C-alpha cells in the first residue's frame, strides 16, 4: 500500500506537474492559430440582420424542395451563413476601395451549388465548377452559372478576370486555391473554408505535430502556403452549424516582383509535389518568341462517378456466403431460449459475438474485397438488419416477433402496414429451427 502511494506521488512530481506547468506557461497563440471569437472581419450586427433576411428569402423554399440525400437544414443554413459573411466582406472591400462595382467570383468545387445560386441572385457575377452534377442544380433557374468540369492545377487553371476565388469545402483543391489565385492576377483574392485535409498532390494530409489537433495543424499548413504565395492572410471563425468553421481570407497581396514571387511558389511546389516543367513557344503571331511555362504535378482529382461504398454492389453469391458464415458462427453453441405462446418453444437464438471474432472466420480475400470496395463487414451486416443486430461492435440475431408486429397501426394514417410483408422471412427459410413465431406475428412472409 505504501509503495503504491510513493509511486503515485513520484508520478505526480515527475510527469503530471511538469506538464501542467508547461501548458500554463505556454501562450495560446503558440499552440494554435485558430481565432477564439467569431466574425472578426465583419459587423456581427449587420451579419445577424443579413443572415435572417437571406434565410427568409431562400431557406424555407430550398429545404422544402431539397432533392439530395443530405440533411437540408444543415447544408442550406450553412451556405446561407457563408453567403451572408461573403456579402458583408465584399461590401467592406468596396467601401475601402471606394467603388460600387460588385465583385465577381469563382467557386471551385461548388458541390450543391447553393452558395453560387445565392451570391449570383444577390447581384454578383460568378461561376461554380464541380466534377459532378447534383440533383438540386435542376431546381435552380437556368441562368444560374454552374458547370461540370474536372479541375486539375496547371498553367491553364488561372482566372485573370475573377476578383475572388472561393474554396468552400473544396477538399483536394483546398491547398491549391491560394496558388491558383496568386497566378491568376495580382488583384485576385480568395476565401477558403477547409474541411477534409489534403496535401498538394491530392493525398490525405498526414499530421506532424502531436501537440496540435489535425484540424489546427492543417489550418497552419494551408496558411503557410498562402504566405508563400504573397498574400496578407486573415483567419476568422464563421457562425455555421459545423465543427470545421475556420476560414482563411487572402485579402491582398504583399508588393513584390512577379518573378520573385513565382520563383518562391515554384520552389514550394517542387518540394511538395512531383513537378514537371515544360517550356514551349506560343504559335500566336502577336506574341512570337514568347516563352510560356507549363506547370503540372502528380495531383490526382477524385473520380467523376462516386463509388458506392455500402455493400450493395457486391456479388450476390459472395453476400450470401458471408451471411451463411456469420449465421453458422452465431448458431454454434448458441443459447437455447423458450418463446411463450409459439409453436416452437425451444429455439436457438445464437450467441453474441464481437465483429473481430466473426471477421476471423471469413476468408481473407473476401474481407479485403469488403474493406476496399464496399465499406466493410459491419456495413454488410447492417444492410441485413432483418437478420442481424449490430451494436457497439457486437453481432447477434434479431429475434423475429420481438420488435414490432405486422398488425400494428401506423400513427400517421391509422392503416395496417400489410405491405411490409412482401420480403420472405430469412429465419423461416434458413434457420435450423425455422421461425420461432407464426406468420401473423412475424414481420416477414412465410
Image: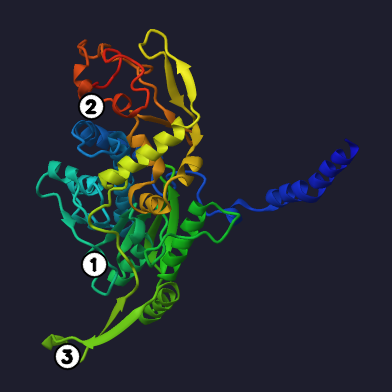
Tell me the residue that label 1 is attached to: 159
What is the number of the mark on residue 413?
none
Are dots 3 and 1 in contact, CB under 8 Å?
Answer: no
Going 27% across and 55% down the picture, which residue do you hit? Answer: 109
Residue 244 lies left or right of residue 23; in this view the side is left
The secondary element bearing badge 3 is classed as loop
Are dots 2 and 3 in contact, CB under 8 Å?
Answer: no
Instruction: Say which label, 1 or 2, has the lower sequence index.
Output: 1
Which residue appears farthest toward the top when viewing the image? 341
Tell me the residue that label 2 is attached to: 423
Instruction: Say which label, 3 or 1, has the lower sequence index.
Output: 1
What is the number of the mark on residue 288?
3
Residue 202 lies left or right of residue 317; in this view the side is right
- Residue 334 locus on image (x, y percent): 48, 27
Instruction: Say which label, 2 or 3, has the lower sequence index.
Output: 3
* 3D distance between C-alphas at marks 1 and 2: 55 Å
- Residue 382 locus on image (x, y percent): 36, 35
Amino acid at each position: 500500500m505504501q509503495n503504491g502511494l510513493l509511486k503515485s506521488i513520484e508520478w505526480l512530481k515527475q510527469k503530471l506537474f511538469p506538464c501542467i506547468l508547461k501548458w500554463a506557461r505556454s501562450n495560446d497563440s503558440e499552440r494554435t492559430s485558430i481565432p477564439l471569437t467569431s466574425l472578426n472581419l465583419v459587423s456581427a450586427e449587420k451579419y445577424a440582420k443579413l443572415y435572417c433576411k437571406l434565410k427568409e428569402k431562400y431557406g424555407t423554399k430550398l429545404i422544402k424542395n431539397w432533392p439530395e440525400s443530405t440533411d437540408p437544414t444543415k447544408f442550406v443554413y450553412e451556405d446561407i451563413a457563408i453567403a451572408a459573411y461573403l456579402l458583408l466582406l465584399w461590401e467592406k472591400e468596396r467601401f475601402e476601395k471606394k467603388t460600387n462595382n460588385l465583385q465577381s467570383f469563382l467557386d471551385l468545387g461548388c458541390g450543391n451549388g447553393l452558395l453560387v445560386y445565392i451570391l449570383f441572385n444577390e447581384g454578383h457575377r460568378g461561376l461554380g465548377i464541380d466534377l459532378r452534377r447534383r440533383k438540386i442544380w435542376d431546381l435552380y433557374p437556368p441562368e444560374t452559372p454552374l458547370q461540370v468540369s474536372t479541375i486539375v492545377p496547371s498553367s491553364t487553371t488561372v482566372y485573370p478576370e475573377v476578383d475572388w476565388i472561393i474554396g468552400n469545402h473544396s477538399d483536394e483543391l483546398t491547398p491549391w486555391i491560394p496558388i491558383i489565385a496568386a497566378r491568376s492576377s495580382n488583384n485576385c483574392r480568395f476565401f477558403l473554408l477547409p474541411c477534409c485535409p489534403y496535401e498538394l498532390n491530392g493525398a490525405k494530409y498526414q499530421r506532424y505535430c502531436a501537440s496540435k489537433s489535425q484540424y489546427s495543424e492543417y489550418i497552419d499548413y494551408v496558411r503557410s502556403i498562402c504566405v508563400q504565395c504573397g498574400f496578407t492572410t486573415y483567419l476568422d471563425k464563421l457562425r455555421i452549424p459545423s465543427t470545421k468553421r475556420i476560414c482563411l481570407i487572402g485579402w491582398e497581396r504583399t508588393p513584390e516582383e512577379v518573378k520573385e514571387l513565382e520563383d518562391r511558389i515554384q520552389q514550394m511546389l517542387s518540394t511538395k509535389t512531383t513537378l514537371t516543367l515544360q517550356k514551349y513557344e506560343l504559335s500566336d503571331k502577336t506574341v512570337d518568341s514568347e516563352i510560356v511555362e507549363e506547370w503540372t504535378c502528380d495531383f490526382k482529382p477524385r473520380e467523376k462517378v462516386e463509388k458506392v461504398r455500402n455493400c450493395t454492389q457486391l456479388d450476390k453469391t459472395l453476400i450470401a456466403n458471408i451471411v451463411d458464415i456469420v449465421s453458422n458462427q452465431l448458431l454454434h453453441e448458441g443459447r437455447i431460449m423458450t418463446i411463450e405462446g409459439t409453436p416452437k418453444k425451444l429455439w436457438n437464438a445464437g450467441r453474441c459475438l464481437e465483429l473481430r471474432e466473426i471477421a476471423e472466420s471469413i476468408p481473407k480475400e473476401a474481407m479485403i474485397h469488403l474493406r476496399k470496395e464496399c465499406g466493410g463487414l459491419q456495413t454488410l451486416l447492417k444492410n441485413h438488419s432483418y437478420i442481424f443486430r449490430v451494436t457497439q461492435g457486437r453481432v447477434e440475431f434479431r429475434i423475429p416477433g420481438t420488435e414490432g408486429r405486422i398488425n400494428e397501426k401506423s400513427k400517421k394514417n391509422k392503416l395496417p402496414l400489410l405491405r411490409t410483408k412482401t420480403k420472405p422471412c430469412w429465419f423461416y427459410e434458413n434457420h435450423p429451427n425455422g421461425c420461432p413465431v407464426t406468420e401473423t406475428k412475424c414481420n416477414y412472409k412465410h
